[in-house]
Image: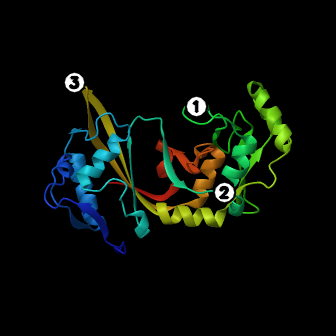
Amino acid sequence: MANKYKQLRFLAEEDQIYDPKNRESGREHTVKIYTKETLIEELQKIRDSGWILGARHGNAGSVGNTLEDLLGIEENNLPIPNASEWELKCQRAKTTSLVTLFHMEPSPRAIKFVPLVFLPNYGWSHKEAGTKYSTEEMSFRQTISGSTRSDCGFILIVDWDNSKLLVSFDANTVNPRHETWLRIVETLMGLGELNPQPYWGFEDLGHKAGTKLLNCFYVKADVKREEGKEFFRYSQILMLQEFSLDSFLVGIEQGYVFVDFDARTGHNHGTKFRLRQDKLPSLYASVTEI
């Protein structure tokens, strides 16, 4: 296949790619250029280096931070998605955590559904209301899938006929332990279906995911601890190409792609599409181990 991809630009130390402490040495950063092929070479060198001391002790994201350091990438300054070419994702091999694919608020966006409908009408008192926050602080946190309803009655529905992904609410499925909350919802909104019903259009989802996740390098790392320190071995590198919207939607129906709402009165942390980490390759038409 001809190399049609743009060159990838990273902020990097020119001559000490593999020194995780190098960014703290005070040396001036320079710009290093990677093509897809040279990026693969660097990832293979890292894989073949064996066990590497973690760069961010006590940081849950140390496995990804260390890989960024090894590649010379400034934290939170990865321009691959902006080039609409490649995303880089890294996880611990045996983690049960979810991969965040992208952020996207539901339509109709003019309503600002999460902060203006879900939070005040379907939310509950924040656990730190009256301590860290004011006594009126509300919270709406829900992780929902398309396979089973949450204990608060929410589920995702893939409407293939109308090319929409919908959020649905059924008061009859709410767990009895949330009875007090449900009575408040009944007073504010009634116990019927959400109206209007928040949704994401397939076309919008395809554009968002296709832009950010068109192609992806997915790196899995083994982890060990010695004398209180974490070491990583970046043992598997997968090159994932041609994101499939249909596979993504099937993943929602089968319950391994989720929508995560996370809002409080003072701040909407954003609506995330998330995935069980071992399922990422299933979203792509082509999977190649390098």
Q: Residues within 10 Å of mark 3 (few under 14, many from 20)?
A: few
Amino acid type of the residue tagged 2 in the rendering: Pro
- Which residue is identified by label 3? 227
| Secondary-structure class at tag 3 | loop
Which quadrant holds residue 79?
A: bottom left
Q: Is residue 215 left or right of residue 110?
A: left
Q: Sequence order check: which comes first, mark 3 or mark 2?
A: 2
Q: Identify whether 28 is placed above or below 144.
A: below
Q: Quadrant of the N terminus?
A: bottom left
Whole-angstrom CA distance, mark 3 to mark 1, is 36 Å
Left or right position of 262 against 81: right
In front: label 3 or label 1: 1
Compared to 83, does 173 lie above or below? above
What residue is disc 1 on? 128
Pick whichever, 258 or 60, lies toward us.
Answer: 60
Say which of 156 and 4 sits in front.
Answer: 156
Helix, strand or loop at mark 2: loop
Looking at the picture, tell me which residue is in the foreground, 169 or 247: 169
Residue at mark 2: 106
